Image: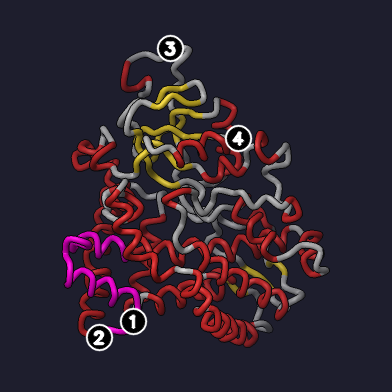
Amino acid sequence: MTATETGPASPAEPLPVAIDPFGADIRAESARLRALGPLVPVELPGGIPAWAPTTYDVLRTLILDPRVSKDPRKHWSRFAEVPGNPSWAWILGWVGVINMLSTYGTDHTRLRKLVAPSFTARRTEAMRPRVEAVTEELLDALEEAANGGPVDLRGTYANPVPMRIICELFGVPDHLVPDVRRLVTAIIDTSDTSPEHAASVQRQIGTVLPALIAYKAEHPGDDMTTELIRVHDEDGDRLSDEELVYTLLLVIGAGFETTVNLIGNTVVGLLRHPEQLAAVRAGEIGWEAVVDEVLRVYPSIASLPLRFAVSDIDIAGVTVPAGDAILTTYAAASYDPGHYGDDAAEFDPGRGADDHLSFGIGVHRCIGAPLAKVEALTALPRLFERFPDMRLAVDPAELSQVPSFIAYGWQEIPVVLR
């Protein structure tokens, strides 16, 4: 696929671009890649080769193409190399699992059907009162801290809102919540691709989730973990031991980490653009439009590894050979001036761009998207109502991106509430 694999580069075969594992400037990196073409060779941390779409249309086309798979065991020609390459071990947390994120065809359909009942519109709407109650509890706690100087809004609000809701939905007991949070944080962190970090992630997967399963087997309840255990015990052909563990990893992890960033990114976006916040407060821009624009211009997941070409795919003047890996580049698509105009990288909730791909599209569209929106559309308006004078406690340039090319969010969001 790349010059490094086939010999000296020719003019028609560009060298792959190394993706920044820290995700320090995702917008600038997206622009640099786009300047090279609509579909370019890149290297993920550790030197993993992949293709990166840089335009909206190319990414959308590949996501919807049935010749693109998410199952590395069947369709990634380099998958067998991972166990023997310590620099690639980190990718196992993303593609070495067996759940909806890493399956294809009938396997994906089977696993998705097991989880889908917990995220129907009716079930999601039924959770609204609980989301409202959790929101008010956390706002009351913030009220007590409002006169004590700056607070970290990520740690005190953006994180606990979705964390508490997803843990209640899956029956995670209080004593396991910190372990679950640490596990998801470790997987998201792509700045450390050492074999030691990868081994630590695998150990956590192998202890935290089995501990949850064992607890819920002894203390069943009206929650999704209990239901998945029931399916596993009654019909192992529908859900294996491995699939049970990795399905919980996916749905619990994605169910809070992405919404943490959605809430946090919205707060930062509006506080950095007071004219936009004023328009929201005046009723000129609705909160739905704000959330959609945040998902577009600050996508909670900037890039998601990996998809794989089932057969040769000719697209955008490039042939992606069968077996090659493809990075799902939500951020790059969001900044595409060919789709969103010359100001594509600017935050403008008034543009009405609700066709973003940040929740995915097609059979792999995020199953928890409705719940994420309920949480954000509850937590955000109430936060700005309760603290109308809220402002950032640091210069926006001092905010630090989470150390990841996958996630898009801030490590801390220091604010002054009054």
Q: Position of residue 325 (x, y in %)?
A: 36, 35
Q: Position of residue 76 (x, y in %)?
A: 28, 36
Q: Position of residue 383 (x, y in %)?
A: 66, 76
The span from disc 4 to disc 2 (Cα, nearest Å) is 51 Å
Q: Which residue is mark 1?
A: 173
Identify the residue at horizontal 27%, vertical 69% (top origin): 208
Q: Quadrant of residue 128?
A: bottom right
Q: Amino acid at mark 2?
A: His
The chief SS type of the magenta part is helix
The span from disc 4 to disc 3 (Cα, nearest Å) is 23 Å
Q: Is residue 237 covered in magenta?
A: yes
**Who comes first in sequence, dot 1 or dot 2?**
1
Q: Nearer the viewer, residue 195 or 204?
A: 204
Q: Which residue is mark 3?
A: 10
Q: Amino acid at mark 4?
A: Ala
**Who comes first in sequence, dot 1 or dot 3?**
3
**Who comes first in sequence, dot 1 or dot 4?**
4
Of badges 1 and 3, the one in the foreground is 1
Of badges 1 and 2, the one in the foreground is 2
Q: Is residue 320 covered in magenta?
A: no
Q: Position of residue 211 (x, y in %)?
A: 23, 74
**Who comes first in sequence, dot 4 or dot 3?**
3
Mark 1 and mark 4 in contact? Answer it, CB < 8 Å: no
